[in-house]
Image (cartoon, helix red, strand yellow):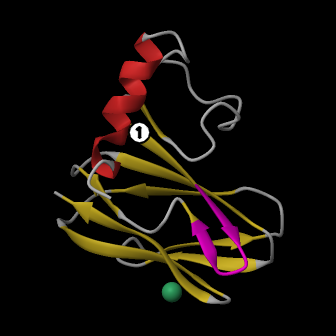
């Protein structure tokens, strides 16, 4: 999905067009952009939905500059564990309840974010 990396900017452009305010933090928890990435300064937000073994949006690589933060909001239809390799970050997921994991990029590299039950790769974070 080559267009995926450009999403933060695409969303920003849309925001300028009046879809949503670029600078406003997502108080609506993505009701307007269920599968999108939006940018709030140095924090990017990505929402992922899991239904069984299906991950939406499809697993892709997200680029994250060193020093910026990715706020990952994961909603699953079952209880699970969320694990971000390299960031040493974990979160419990309760069925139907959005779980938020904040990943701050420190070391350049490529890191997988996954769930454990079942083992699914949600995305790869490429820190640059
Ligand atoms: Cu793991």
Dominant secondary structure of the magenta stretch? strand
- Magenta stretch containing residue 26, yes or no? no
Local packing at callout 1 (Cα closer than 10 Å; few below 14, some 14-19, many 20+) is: some
Q: Secondary structure at mark 1?
A: strand
Work out which quarter of the rendered image holds the N terminus and state it. bottom left
Image height check: is 97 above or below 8?
below
Rendered residue at 79%/78% (across/down): 79
Work out whether residue 123 or residue 4 is closer to the camera in this orientation and state it: 4
Is residue 54 on the magenta stretch? yes
| Picture coordinates of residue 53, whole percent (x, y) | 65, 81
Q: How many marks?
A: 1
* Residue at figure coordinates x 34%, y 50% from the top left: 4
Question: Can residue 42 be seen at all in this image of the molecule?
Answer: no
User: To which residue does mark 1 refer?
Assistant: 43
User: At which x and y percent is residue 110?
Assistant: 24, 72
Q: In percent of the image, x 39 and y 70: which residue is there?
A: 87
Residue located at (42% from left, 30% from top): 11
- State which region is magenta: 48-55
Q: Classify the position of the C terminus by image quarter.
A: bottom left
């Amino acid at each position: 999905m080559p267009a995926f990396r450009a999403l933060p900017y695409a969303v920003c452009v849309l925001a300028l067009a009046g879809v949503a305010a670029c600078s406003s933090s997502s108080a609506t928890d993505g009701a307007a952009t269920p599968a999108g990435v939006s940018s709030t300064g140095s924090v990017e937000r990505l929402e992922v939905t899991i239904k069984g073994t299906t991950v939406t949006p499809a697993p892709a690589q997200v680029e994250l500059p060193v020093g910026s933060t990715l706020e990952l909001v994961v909603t699953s239809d079952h209880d699970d564990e969320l694990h971000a390799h390299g960031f040493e970050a974990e979160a419990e997921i309760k069925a139907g309840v959005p779980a938020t994991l904040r990943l701050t990029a420190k070391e350049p590299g490529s890191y997988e974010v996954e769930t454990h039950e079942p083992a699914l790769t949600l995305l790869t974070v490429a820190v640059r």
